Image (tube, rainbow, N blue to C red):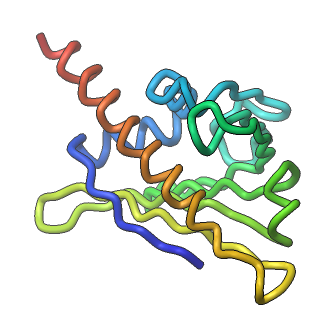
Amino acid sequence: MLVADVEIQSPADDFYKLLINETHHFITASPDTVHTLDVHEGDGYSAGSIRSWTYCVEPGGEKEVYKERVVVDEQNKTLEMVAISGHIFDQYKTYKIVFKVFEKDETAFVKLQLVYEKYKDSDPEPEHYLKFLTKLLKASDSHLLQKLRGSSS
């Protein structure tokens, strides 16, 4: 498992709402890396929904697809994106992205966890995905702050 605590400037509750109800804003926040979000089952946001993303880990890089099942834990402000197909399985047997929004000392954070199983011990850790998702969280935070500031003027 790889873990990072990403500090955000947005209020924790607002950022959690973005993660749960407005994940499509990842595309607006980072259009050079996140290209599409397609919903296959459910509403795309609630637990059990199946959706797929098209993205590039690096701007201009190779396009990848990540198809996932959504798991939501409202009480703990947690969103899990459990891989069910896509390019990730070229590298890992199992893969799950976990976002948990929390506050510590009046500062908001997103705990980002990549939970995965490698095919072989010698396979690389998914550090490039951790960096990609950290950048995506930061871009989404900036996007949300602009939106919040715009609605309060």
Percent position of residue 86, x then y: 85, 48
Residue drawn at x 25%, y 29% as measured from the top left: 145
Towards the viewer: 103 or 65 = 65
Outermost residue on the front side: it is 60
Is 26 above or below relative to 114?
A: above
Is 42 above or below relative to 87?
A: above
Percent position of residue 111, x then y: 41, 64
In the displayed structure, does residue 62 sit left or right of residue 146?
right
Assign the C terminus to one quadrant of the image: top left
Percent position of residue 41, x then y: 83, 34
In the displayed structure, does residue 66 sit left or right of residue 114?
right
In the displayed structure, does residue 95 sit left or right of residue 16?
right
Q: Quadrant of the rendered structure where residue 82 is? A: bottom right
Towards the viewer: 62 or 111 = 62
Percent position of residue 123, x then y: 77, 79
Q: Quadrant of the rendered structure where residue 81 is? A: bottom right
Towards the viewer: 148 or 65 = 65
Outermost residue on the bottom side: it is 121
Residue drawn at x 84%, y 31% as measured from the top left: 40
Q: Quadrant of the rendered structure where residue 39 is? A: top right
Outermost residue on the top side: it is 153
Residue drawn at x 77%, y 45% as measured from the top left: 66
Q: How many marks?
A: 0
Residue drawn at x 40%, y 35% as measured from the top left: 140
Is 58 above or below relative to 31?
A: below
